């Protein structure tokens, strides 16, 4: 793999760093779908919210596939070609998302957007890695990258929601277009094209493996996201999607194990840290989704989308504090498992605080402390688990490992579990509503309220509160169990290392 500097030699450092920051920010935050304005999108188009959740997941699926394939693309195209093409394609896909009313086209555009985003992201990522560490020490870069990604994404969600609230959801994409056009202009002016000395032939890329894996993930995305509205096993489409996802993945697995140049190298699963890291990301998906908080703020407190996006800005100080701690933690060489344990404990504390706060009199200003703690835990886990997963991996397989990491973290651990939480919340809310209706003396109650509408609204709120508290309790229990697993693994590792050290010292005795 040939590595070159991104800029012309005449570009001074005081221009390089701002340009690099604008590029990394624009690439990370321009996602095609922003959760803050999706309510206005599907309300305006008269469709379900599920296609846009599916499109959001498709973007991360595309990023995972793009990372796995980028090893081969990096050997075929120059750095400026990949960066410029990636930005142009991102702009085109965002234009499609902003103008189309076809949900299938939106999902496809987000999948392509995630794939081509990697073309630009890796080129800027490598240069930032050299800025932070000449020895390619990713522990110096990860805190910066994740603060830019998470903090920038929450800010962009707030900004697009503000524009949607003021004008229209289509106008909220204007800031995305401006940012991407500015990035393209910067690349045209400051980035130098370095032709490759040896180009990798296209025929050696496993296109069939790419299609099989992508098809499996997209069918799984469709089945899990749409299961609630299509009633899971009662829907032939959902059953067919689950079977199709399983069959295509098995075909992909068989092909990769017998192919000379596989699309994905499964030998990295031989690394214990890689397996453990993927498991930690699935655990993160159990405690991270904000399904219960968004249901509480929208269904009980009746906050608009603009208020919910403002609430998420409370996460940014916590994310910043967590990233700063991670930087100095790794600089001092402390154990990463302690950071992982602290991150999961932060989520347990956050959910306990929210569990005790589910009430009608909860104020918007009361969210700041729980959300700062959640942001702090998010930063710790994203940085620590990310570094733990890719630790001791060769440069030739680290991109494939990072691709698998993104799919597990943001799709399987985040998207699928979040969709299941949404279904469980809906199911439990109906059960609690039936229970409340069975216990209610409606004739006596209607004499003291203004009709059946108030009665129904009150019962819906109480059912939502009961379901949210019940499922949040389960998440707290799961978070405590996860923390105990991480603690037990850490203590076992320490005891084992001490036993090995004593055995070595014993054998050295004369």
Image (cartoon, rainbow, N blue to C red):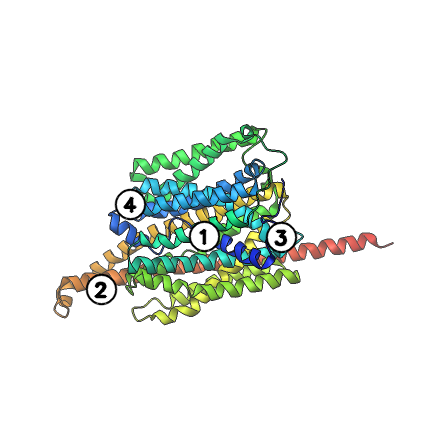
What residue is rendered at 80% in x and 54% in y?
506
In front of the other: label 4 or label 3? 3
Q: Is residue 160 left or right of residue 477?
A: left
**Residue 124 percent coordinates (x, y):** 55, 49
Upstream in sequence: badge 1 or badge 4: 1
Disc 3 vs disc 1: which is toward the camera? 1
* Nearer-N-terminus badge (2/4): 4
Q: Residue furthest right?
A: 510
Can residue 54 be seen in the rendering of this structure? no
Check contact, mark 2 vs mark 1: CB within 8 A.
no
Q: CA distance from mark 3 to mark 1?
A: 24 Å
Question: Does residue 125 appear anywhere in the picture?
Answer: yes
Residue behind mark 2 = 458
Q: Which residue is mark 3?
A: 130
**Cα gap from disc 1 to disc 4, whole angstroms:** 41 Å
Q: Residue at x 44, y 56 (%)?
A: 153
Q: Position of residue 428 (x, y in %)?
A: 31, 54
In primary-sequence order, the first of circles 2 and 1 is 1
Residue holding disc 4: 229
**Which quarter of the rendered picture does the C terminus lie within?**
bottom right
* Of the pair 441 and 414, the residue shown nearer to us: 414
Q: Are marks 1 and 4 in contact (CB under 8 Å)?
A: no
């Amino acid at each position: 793999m040939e590595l070159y500097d991104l800029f012309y030699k005449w570009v001074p450092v005081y221009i390089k760093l701002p340009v690099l920051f604008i590029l990394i920010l624009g690439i990370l935050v321009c996602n095609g779908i922003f959760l803050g304005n999706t309510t206005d999108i599907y309300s305006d188009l008269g469709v379900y919210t599920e296609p846009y959740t599916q499109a959001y997941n498709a973007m991360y699926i595309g990023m995972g596939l793009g990372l796995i394939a980028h090893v081969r693309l990096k050997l075929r195209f120059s750095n400026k070609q990949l960066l410029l093409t990636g930005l142009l394609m991102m702009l085109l896909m965002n234009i499609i998302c902003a103008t189309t009313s076809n949900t299938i086209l939106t999902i496809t555009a987000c999948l392509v957007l995630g794939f081509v985003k990697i073309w630009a992201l890796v080129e800027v990522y490598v240069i930032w890695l050299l800025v932070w560490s000449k020895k390619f020490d990713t522990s110096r870069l990860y805190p910066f990258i994740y603060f830019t990604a998470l903090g920038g994404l929450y800010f962009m969600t707030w900004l697009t929601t503000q524009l949607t609230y003021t004008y229209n959801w289509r106008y909220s994409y204007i800031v995305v277009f401006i940012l991407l056009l500015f990035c393209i202009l910067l690349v045209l002016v400051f980035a130098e094209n370095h032709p490759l000395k040896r180009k990798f032939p296209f025929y050696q890329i496993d296109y069939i493996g790419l299609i099989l894996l992508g098809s499996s993930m997209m069918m799984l995305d469709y089945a899990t996201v749409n299961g609630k509205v299509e009633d899971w096993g009662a829907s032939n489409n959902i059953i067919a999607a689950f079977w199709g996802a399983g069959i295509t993945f098995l075909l992909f697995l068989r092909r990769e194990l017998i192919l000379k140049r596989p699309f994905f190298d499964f030998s990295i699963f031989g690394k214990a840290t890689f397996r453990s890291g993927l498991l930690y990301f699935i655990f993160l998906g159990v405690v991270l989704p904000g399904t219960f908080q968004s249901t509480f703020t929208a269904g009980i407190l009746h906050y608009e989308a603009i208020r919910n996006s403002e609430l998420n800005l409370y996460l940014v100080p916590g994310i910043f504090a967590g990233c700063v701690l991670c930087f100095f933690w790794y600089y001092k060489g402390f154990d990463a498992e302690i950071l992982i344990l602290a991150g999961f404990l932060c989520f347990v504390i956050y959910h306990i605080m929210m569990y005790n706060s589910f009430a009608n009199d909860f104020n918007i200003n009361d969210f700041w402390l729980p959300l700062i703690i959640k942001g702090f835990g998010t930063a710790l886990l994203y940085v620590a688990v990310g570094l733990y997963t890719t630790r001791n991996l060769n440069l030739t397989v680290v991109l494939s490992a990072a691709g698998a990491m993104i799919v597990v973290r943001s799709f399987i651990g985040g998207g699928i579990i979040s969709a299941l939480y949404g279904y469980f919340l809906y199911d439990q809310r109906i059960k609690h509503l039936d229970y409340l209706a069975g216990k209610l003396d409606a004739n006596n109650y209607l004499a003291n309220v203004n009709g059946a509408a108030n009665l129904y609204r009150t019962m819906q709120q109480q059912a939502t509160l009961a379901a949210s508290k019940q499922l949040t309790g389960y998440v707290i229990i799961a978070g405590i169990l996860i923390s105990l697993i991480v603690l037990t693994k850490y203590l076992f590792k320490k005891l084992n290392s001490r036993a090995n050290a004593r055995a070595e010292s014993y054998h050295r005795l004369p």
